[in-house]
Amino acid sequence: MTENLYNIYSTWLKQRYGEKVYKIPVNIPVTCPNRDGTIATGGCVYCGAKGGGNETLSDQLSVSEQLERNIAYIGKRYHAKKFIPYFQSFSNTYCELPDFQKWILEAIRPDVVEIAVSTRPDCITDEQLQFLAMVKKEQAIEVTIELGLQSVNEKTLQIINRGHTLADYEQAMERIKAAGLSTCTHMILDLPWDQEADVIDGAEIVSRKGSDFVKCHSLYIEKNTVLKQWYDEKKVTLLTKEDYIIRAILFLEHLDPEIVVQRLIGRVPKEDSVITNWHTSWWKIKDELEAQMKQENNYQGRKFSGMNNKR
Ligand code: SF4
């Protein structure tokens, strides 16, 4: 059923690589310019202590050791043989070039088919892009840069203290595409300061900029965040699960049908979270969303206008 509703990542991976492929989180000792005072202090209002990396091993372990341990576990448990090291926590390009090069090269193994690097749109140097383009060519593996955007509404970006603009995202996408690398865009679909029109604009802009993948999640509240404080002080009201489903469907129907959806609902470990996904399992929300799409005869790209100037 789901295959006809939206472009699912696991299916796409299987078609591309001929078998199951697993993303393996990798943790390196970086922080984020939006937290350490370079751009701002405190970071995005929802950013928790782990900077978005929730299933990682200690950054005190080498990249190769983290991969060794995780691959041994996941490979055995899921009978997987191909992997994507995923540099996940904080801004993984916020480091010196030699360190960046060393960590990326450490992640290359015979069973690795791709490398994914998560970062901010305003935090990628030309040297890093050139290096990743060279890795892609010489190692014959795909390289994907994952960019946090979250909203295309400038006012919302300011409220949540992203510290970058929509133009920063658009320019980063152009530079990454020009380097021949893949791109994944992260979006939060139920930011209370966004309207449904912003969600539609988000789908259209991400499509127009040629993002190869998207990752979506709801706004969750982690412990020790500015958002938690706002929530306690009743300065913010979260949207409902039903609102999220409506917005996620809106996003999908305006999204280029070629874009692969890596995730529709996020997850935060219980110990870090105050409210995540309305205390409902992510897969129940996914099931509800898919049932609603089916009932509406809806599908990814149904209202996608086709972009004359796409890519
Ligand atoms: S850009 Fe990412 S790591 Fe940096 S503060 Fe925002 S959510 Fe946290």
Image: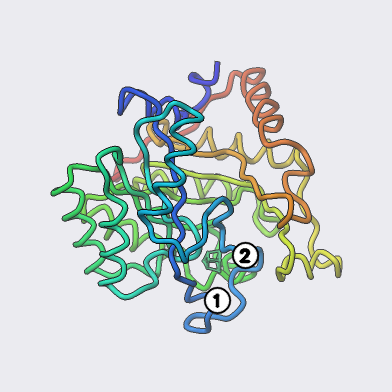
- Depicted 286 relative to depicted 187: above or below: above
Residue lying furthest top: 1
In the picture, the quarter occupied by the N terminus is top right
Place of residue 168 in the rendered image (x, y in percent of width and height, measured from the top left): 40, 67
- Depicted 8 relative to depicted 135: above or below: above
Q: Which residue is mark 1?
A: 35
Q: Which residue is mark 2?
A: 47
Q: Quadrant of residue 221?
A: bottom right
Place of residue 199 in the rendered image (x, y in percent of width and height, measured from the top left): 58, 47
Judged left or right of residue 244, residue 133 is left
- Depicted 113 relative to depicted 50: above or below: above
Residue at (77%, 52%) from the top-left corner?
275
Place of residue 250 in the rendered image (x, y in percent of width and height, measured from the top left): 59, 37
Give the amino acid at mark 2: Cys
Q: Decide which of 261, 74 is in the foreground and name it.
A: 74
- Determine whether label 2 and label 1 are within 8 Å by CB: yes
Residue at (30%, 70%) from the top-left corner?
99
Place of residue 207 in the rendered image (x, y in percent of width and height, measured from the top left): 40, 43
The quarter of the picture showing ligand 1: bottom right
Judged left or right of residue 231, residue 111 is left
**Which tag, 2 or 1, sits closer to the chain's start?**
1
Residue at (43%, 36%) from the top-left corner?
22
Q: How is this picture coloured?
A: rainbow
Q: Decide which of 180, 239 is in the foreground and name it.
A: 180
Judged left or right of residue 286, residue 241 is right
Q: Is mark 1 within 8 Å of ligand 1?
A: yes
Q: Decide which of 179, 166 is in the foreground and name it.
A: 179
Q: Residues within 10 Å of mark 1 (few under 14, many from 20)?
A: some
